[in-house]
Every structure is written in C-alpha cells, then in structure tokens.
Image (cartoon, rainbow, N blue to C red):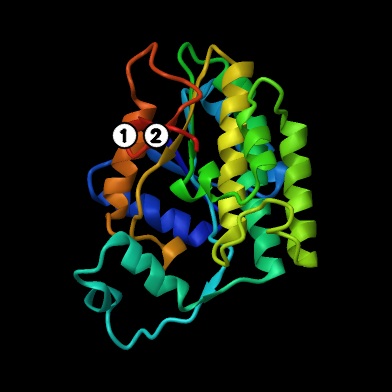
Amino acid sequence: MVILTARDEKRGSESVEMLHESGLPDVQFHRLDVSDPSSAARLAEFIREKFGRLDILINNAGVIGATAEIDTTAPIEEVLVGKSTMERLQWLLQRSTESYEEAEECLKINYFGTKYVTEALLPILLSSSDGRLINVSSNLGLLRHFSGEDLKQELSDVDNLTVERLDEMSELFLKDYKNGQLKSHGWPADSHYLAYKVSKALINGYTRIMSKKYPGLRINSVHPGYCKTDINFDTGIYTAEDGASCIVAVALLPEGGPTGVFFFRTEEAPFV
C-alpha cells in the first residue's frame, strides 16, 4: 500500500483517482502540509493505526524559492526543443526573480518540512524490518556551489555535524540573505536559486547525520535529474515518470545496500 500526500486535498485526491484508473489500486490519499508539524503528526497516527509500521518514506515535497514570468502563448516544449539541460536552466533563470519571502518559504518547506515529516514518521519507520528513507535532493545542493571553504568543510564533517547546527545554518543564511552578505559569509552567491541550493545542501547534511544515527535504516539522498514538473515550470529534460523511477529504484535497492549516500539518478556520487 502506498500513501500519497499533498497539501492541496483536491489535487491529491485527483492524483489518486488517476492512479486507480491506470490500474494501481493500492494507493490512498492523506492530506499533509510538510511545513506544519501537527499535520505530520496526524499522518503518522493514521499510518500507525491503519498499518502499524512504515517500510519506506520518500520526502519529495519542495519549492524552488523563485518566481518565473513565462510567456505561455507557445507550449514550453516547443520553445525549448533541442536545448540542453544547461540551456533550459539558463532560459528559465533569465525569467526568474527571487525574494527574501520566497527564500524563507523555500527553507521552511524543503529543509524543515523534510525534518518535520521524518521526525513524525521515524518511530513507525523503525518498526520495519528493513526501513528505507529517501530524501529527494538536487545536484544544486552539492557543496561545490558554496563560495566559502569554511561552510563546505563544516557540512562535510559528518562526525561533528548536528541537526541543531543545520537549523542554525538555515537561520544564518536567511539573516545573511536579508543583509546582502551571502558571498562574504561563504553561501552560494551566483545570483540564482540561492535558497534552493542551501535547502538541498542542508537536506544532504540531514541525510548523512540520520544515516549515522540510525544504522538500522537505509537513508539516502537522490537527485532524480532535471525533470518536467511544476517546480521548474515544466522546463526539464526528463519526464516526471523517469525521475520517479530513479527514486523508486534507490528506495528498492536490495537489503544491505548503501546508506548515507548521494545518488545522481541511480548512481552513487559525491556530496561535493
């Protein structure tokens, strides 16, 4: 049984109906606002009462932390046909703007949302004989995007890194964003998707911390590729189905597989 969640109850229910109609009956919907710990707690109670345990948790909710002004008179795919991933991303960047409020929302949903849901569901995930936790990440969260060596080293030092420190980093980033001090303090500062990059770097750090703390679970980050979804205004190279297949492939790796790893689609890759 798969529990599909969404903040928008109408869209979530419609998605489940589509899956049922396509021949996948073992899917249920439960509303979840990842930015609200009480909503995550209600989901955990629902799963506990109905199923008793959770075998796989996939944290996939996220926002880009930017707004794009796109001319929709022509289909996006017609405009972007023949363009590479980098060319598509550059096309989107030229039409995007970011604000402090969007950066704040991005950290709240992407990083803290992942943490809230994981914390709520962890007890029932630990009830599984082979629990797996997948955090959907991005290659934009790799440490190469940070401009300062100190932050790179701190996020790489898994033996000393803590969840509390990740929380502090989120607050420091927003403070520096507001004060225009991103580059001088070592954050990503190349003018695009700054909060998104930091949120995914924090998620990767969270993956590594949790994998050390809970060796009985398999906990990994996955970059599914640049997929056509709402988050990038359907400008991606891969289909959503293709991206989902990568995430599921990592979630279903044989027992005894890797943990604390970053996967670029289905291949192990460095966090840097």
Viewer-side residue, 180 vs 198: 180
Query: Above or below — where is 34 with respect to 129?
Result: below
**Which residue is at 60% across, 18% downward?**
212
Answer yes or no: is residue 245 visible. yes
Whether residues under marks 1 and 2 lie with C-beta atoms below 8 angstroms apart, the answer is yes
Answer yes or no: is residue 46 visible. no
**Which residue is at 49% across, 61% downward?**
10
Q: Amino acid at mark 2?
A: Phe
How many marks the image carries: the answer is: 2
**Which residue is at 53% across, 57% downward?**
9
Secondary structure found at label 2:
strand
Please give the residue where the numbered disc 2 appears in the rendered image.
263
Q: Residues within 10 Å of mark 2 (few under 14, many from 20)?
A: many
Image side of residue 267 versus residue 170, left or right: left
User: Which x, y percent locates residue 161?
Assistant: 70, 28
Q: Within the image, what quadrant is residue 184 found in? A: bottom right
Secondary structure found at label 1:
loop
**Which residue is at 44% across, 54% downward?**
13
User: Which x, y percent locates residue 173?
Assistant: 73, 53
Viewer-side residue, 5 vs 155: 155
Please give the residue where the numbered disc 1 appears in the rendered image.
266
Q: Amino acid at mark 1?
A: Thr
Real-space Cα distance between discs 1 and 2?
Answer: 6 Å
Image side of residue 209 versus residue 73, left or right: right
Q: Within the image, what quadrant is residue 183 found in? A: bottom right
